[in-house]
Image: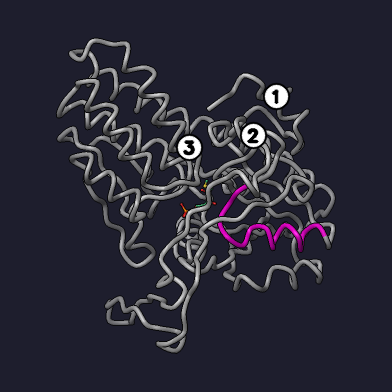
C-alpha cells in the first residue's frame, strides 16, 4: 500500500542485503525504519512489537532464521534461533508456522546451501503473504459489493478492531484488504476504527494507514461499537485473527469477543479475515487451548501521546497505588458468534466440517 503516494511493504531486503522493517513503535507520529542485523535484534523486534500482527510476525521470523544462517549455518544454530524466536510471542500461530516451514526446508540441506535457500524461502513467504491477502480481499469484496447493492447510494459502514491492516502483514492487510479493494473500485465505504486499548493499534496504526490511502474512517472508543450497532450504524464487522482453531473459534486482539457479542445481538454480520497460515488444526477449543499472551500491566495504567511540539510523553491514568492484575493481549470468540471466515480459498463457515473440507491438508 502507499504512504504519501509511494508503495511500501512492511519488510524488505535493503541495498546492503540487510532485513529492514517499518518500526511501528513510532507510528502514527513518525515513519521510521529499523534494520535487523542479527537474531538478537529480531527477537527484540518481535517481542517489543517494532513489528506486530500475526502474518507479519511469521514472515519476519522466517527472515530471522535466514539471518541466523548467514552467521552460522549449523544445525545447532538453526534450532537455537528457532527456539529463541518461538519464545517471543505465544499467541499468533503464524510465528510457529513460519519457523517450522523454514526449519523443515533447511535442515535436510547441506549447511553451505542454507543461507541462500533461507533468504529465497523467506522472500517467497513474503510474496505469498501479499498474494494470499489480495486474494482473500477479493472474497471479502464480494460481501461489500452485495451490501452496496442492497443499499444503493448509501455508505457502507464497516467496523474493525485492532490493526489487521497492511502494517500487520507484508501488504494489503487481512481485514482491510477487502476494504481497500472496495474503496479502489469506488464503493462508498467508511470504517469505524476501534481505538483498541491498551496499546491503541486501531488509533495509532489502522487510522494512520487508512488515512494514508484516503479511506474515510472515524476513530471510536472501544466501548462504542455496541451502541453504534444498536443504532444501525454498522453494516458489517471485519476483524483479523491470530489463530483460528479446527472448530472455528477465533483468537484475536483483546476486545474482539465483546464486538462479536454485540454484533450477534444486533444481527450485524461478523466476519473474520483468516489467511490459511493462521489456521491451527492442532487445536479445537480456543478458549482452553490457545496460549494467551499476558502483557505488562503498565500498558493499562499508562498511556502515551504526542504533544504538539513533537515530544512523546507517557502518563499514568490511574492512582499510583491501583494494581493492574493481568493484561491479556487476546481473547477468543467462539465459532457460534462468527458469521464466516474470509479466506484466500473463499468464504468458509466457522465450523469443523466446513474448515475440514476447505483446509483438511493444512496442519501446523
Ligand atoms: O498484538 P498485535 O498488535 O500483534 O495483535 C494484532 C492482532 O490481534 C491482529 O488483529 C491480528 O494479528 C490479525 S493481523 C492481520
Task: Locate residue 190: give its quadrant.
Answer: bottom right
What residue is pinned by disc 1? 358
**Along the line of sight, which residue is nearer the eye, 89 or 230?**
89
Which mark is in front, 3 or 2? Answer: 3
Label 3 crowd bin: few (<14), some (14–19), many (20+), radius 10 Å: many
Q: First in sequence: mark 1 or mark 3?
A: 3
Decide: is 247 above or below 272.
Answer: above
- Work out whether residue 170 can be spotted: yes
Do residues under tags 2 and 1 come within 8 Å of each other at their CB atoms? yes
Q: Helix, strand or loop at disc 1?
A: helix
**The magenta stretch spans residue 260:** yes
User: Looking at the image, which residue is at 41% across and 66% down?
Assistant: 296
Do residues under tags 3 and 2 come within 8 Å of each other at their CB atoms? no
Q: Helix, strand or loop at disc 3?
A: helix
Which mark is in front, 2 or 1? Answer: 1
Decide: is 158 above or below 246.
Answer: below
**The magenta stretch spans residue 138:** no
Decide: is 234 above or below 67.
Answer: below
Task: Locate residue 253: give its quadrant.
Answer: bottom right
Q: Is residue 60 left or right of residue 239?
A: left
> Which stretch is magenta?
251-264
**Along the line of sight, which residue is nearer the eye, 186 or 120?**
120
- Work out whether residue 185 can be spotted: no
Decide: is 98 above or below 252.
Answer: above
What residue is pinned by disc 2? 343
Q: Position of residue 24 (x, y in %)?
A: 35, 56
Q: Position of residue 179 (x, y in %)?
A: 61, 49
Q: Helix, strand or loop at disc 2?
A: strand
What residue is pinned by disc 3? 94
Classify mark 3 as within 8 Å of ligand 1 or not, answering yes or no.
no
Amino acid at each position: 500500500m502507499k504512504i504519501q503516494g509511494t508503495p511500501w511493504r512492511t519488510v524488505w531486503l535493503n541495498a546492503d542485503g540487510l532485513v529492514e522493517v517499518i518500526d511501528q513503535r513510532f507510528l502514527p507520529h513518525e515513519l521510521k525504519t529499523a534494520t535487523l542485523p542479527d537474531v538478537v535484534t529480531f527477537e527484540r523486534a518481535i517481542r517489543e512489537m517494532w513489528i506486530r500482527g500475526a502474518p507479519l510476525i511469521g514472515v519476519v521470523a522466517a527472515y530471522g532464521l535466514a539471518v541466523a544462517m548467514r552467521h552460522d549455518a549449523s544445525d545447532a544454530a538453526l534450532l537455537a534461533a528457532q527456539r529463541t524466536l518461538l519464545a517471543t510471542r505465544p499467541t499468533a500461530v503464524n510465528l510457529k508456522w513460519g519457523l517450522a516451514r523454514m526449519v523443515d526446508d533447511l535442515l535436510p540441506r547441506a549447511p553451505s546451501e542454507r543461507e541462500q535457500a533461507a533468504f529465497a524461502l523467506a522472500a517467497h513467504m513474503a510474496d505469498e503473504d501479499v498474494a494470499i491477502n489480495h486474494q482473500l480481499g477479493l472474497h471479502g469484496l464480494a460481501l461489500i459489493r452485495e451490501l452496496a447493492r442492497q443499499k444503493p447510494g448509501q455508505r457502507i459502514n464497516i467496523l474493525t478492531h485492532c490493526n489487521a491492516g497492511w502494517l500487520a502483514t507484508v501488504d494489503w492487510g487481512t481485514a482491510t484488504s477487502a476494504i481497500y479493494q472496495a474503496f479502489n473500485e469506488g464503493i462508498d465505504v467508511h470504517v469505524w476504527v476501534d481505538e483498541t486499548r491498551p496499546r491503541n493499534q486501531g488509533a495509532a496504526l489502522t487510522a494512520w494507514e487508512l488515512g494514508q490511502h484516503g479511506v474515510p474512517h472515524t476513530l471510536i472508543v472501544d466501548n462504542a461499537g455496541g451502541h453504534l450497532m444498536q443504532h444501525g450504524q454498522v453494516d458489517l464487522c471485519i476483524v483479523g485473527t491470530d489463530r483460528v482453531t479446527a472448530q472455528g473459534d477465533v483468537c484475536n486482539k483483546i476486545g474482539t469477543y465483546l464486538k462479536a457479542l454485540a454484533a450477534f445481538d444486533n444481527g450485524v454480520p461478523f466476519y473474520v479475515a483468516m489467511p490459511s497460515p493462521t489456521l491451527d488444526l492442532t487445536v479445537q477449543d480456543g478458549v482452553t487451548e490457545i496460549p494467551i499472551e499476558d502483557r505488562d500491566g503498565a500498558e493499562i495504567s499508562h498511556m502515551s501521546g504526542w504533544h504538539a511540539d513533537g515530544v512523546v510523553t507517557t502518563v499514568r491514568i490511574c492512582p499510583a497505588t491501583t494494581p493492574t492484575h493481568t493484561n491479556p493481549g487476546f481473547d477468543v470468540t467462539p465459532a457460534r458468534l462468527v458469521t464466516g471466515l474470509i479466506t484466500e480459498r473463499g468464504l468458509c463457515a466457522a465450523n469443523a466440517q466446513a474448515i475440514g473440507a476447505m483446509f483438511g491438508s493444512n496442519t501446523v
